[in-house]
Structures are given as structure tokens and as C-alpha cells.
Amino acid sequence: MRPANGLRTIVAQLALGLIEGIMTLMGLIVLVFPLALWSVPQQGIHANTIFYIVMSLGGGAIIVLIGLAYVKGLLFPDRSPPGTAAGGKARMEAYLTWSESQADARKVETQLRSMKGGALHNFAYMSRIVALLGTVVVSIYLGAWASMDFIYGSTEVLSAEARWLLLHPDSWNWK
């Protein structure tokens, strides 16, 4: 196969895209897992079944995400250019000897900046996703509470008998 983009072939790019797509899907499941676990009903016939299904999906997604990250690291190791310093000690040494090799110091500085910028970009992206999901969940729960409070009445204002009469009106006046 001929290389399509850089050093990777088309098949390698497709495999990498598939792995990263599945990892993204599993990451979203892991992200929503606590909310799904929180919304599981506590009573009823299917409460235990639903709880175990949610636990299985969340736990499985975590395991699949870790496994795919490991497989991705094995199949597609990080390819750094030959002149790039490998570890933290080598980077620090390149920083200290920058007067001897300006080119290596510029490469290390660019690499550190791109890593820091990438980490900040990923953190900001995930923060926005968490804020969006939190806003959606709060909006749904607040709307549900407001509609239930409006339809059935507040427990602080109405007594139990008044709420019973609202839910079960006595149209025949048989008390």
C-alpha cells in the first residue's frame, strides 16, 4: 500500500479513525454513565434489572476504552522525528545546551508548546461538553419538577388530603 498522508497508509488511517471513533463513543458513555446511574429507578419490578444493565454498560465502556487506548498505543506508537528529545531529562538537557544546538532547542520548545496547547485545548473541550450536559440535565430536572409542582401542587402549600382531592376529584360529592 502506498502512504496516503505522511507515513501512514490508507488502511492504517482507517483503522486509526475506527479506533478513535469507538474510543470517542466509549468516552461519551463513560461521561454519561454517572448521570444514567443516578436516574435509575429505586423501586419497581425492573429496578434491579435496569441497575445491572446500566452498571454493565458503564463498566464495559470503561474497560473497552482502556483496552482500545492500549491497543492504539501498540499499533500506532508515537513517531517523533529523529532529532527530537525523548524523555523529560533529554528535553531539559536540550534546553540547557541551547547555545550549542539551536535547532534541537527550537524543536523541543515547539514540541512542548504543542503538547501544552493540545492539553489545554482538550481540557477546554471536555469542560464545555460537561457544562453542556450539566445544563441539559439541570434544565430537564428543573422543568420536570416545575411541571409536577404546577400540575399536582406543592407539598409545602397543599396538605396530603388536598393533593389527594386534586389527583382523585370527587365528582359525585360522596365524602
Image (tube, rainbow, N blue to C red):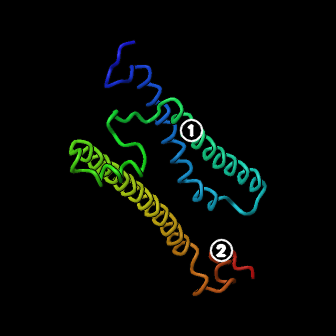
Q: Residues within 10 Å of mark 2 (few under 14, many from 20)?
A: few
**Foreground residue, 168 or 47?**
47
**Mark 1 element type:** helix
**Location of residue 38 in the rendering, given as x and y in whole percent from the top left corner:** 62, 62
**Foreground residue, 22 or 136?**
22
Q: Which residue is drawn at 21% across and 50% down?
A: 99
**Location of residue 77 in the rendering, given as x and y in whole percent from the top left corner:** 47, 33
**Mark 2 element type:** loop
**Foreground residue, 75 or 80?**
80
Q: Residue 169 carries which label?
A: 2
User: What amino acid type is highlighted by mark number 1?
Assistant: Tyr
Q: Name the residue under label 1.
A: 70
| Alpha carbons under labels 2 and 1: distance apart | 62 Å
**Extreme residue in the front direction:** 100
**Foreground residue, 106 or 24?**
106
Q: Is residue 163 left or right of residue 116?
A: right
**Location of residue 119 in the rendering, given as x and y in whole percent from the top left corner:** 38, 53
Q: Which residue is drawn at 68% across and 83% down?
A: 160
Q: Residue 138 carries which label?
A: none
Q: Upstream in the sequence, badge 2 or badge 1? A: 1
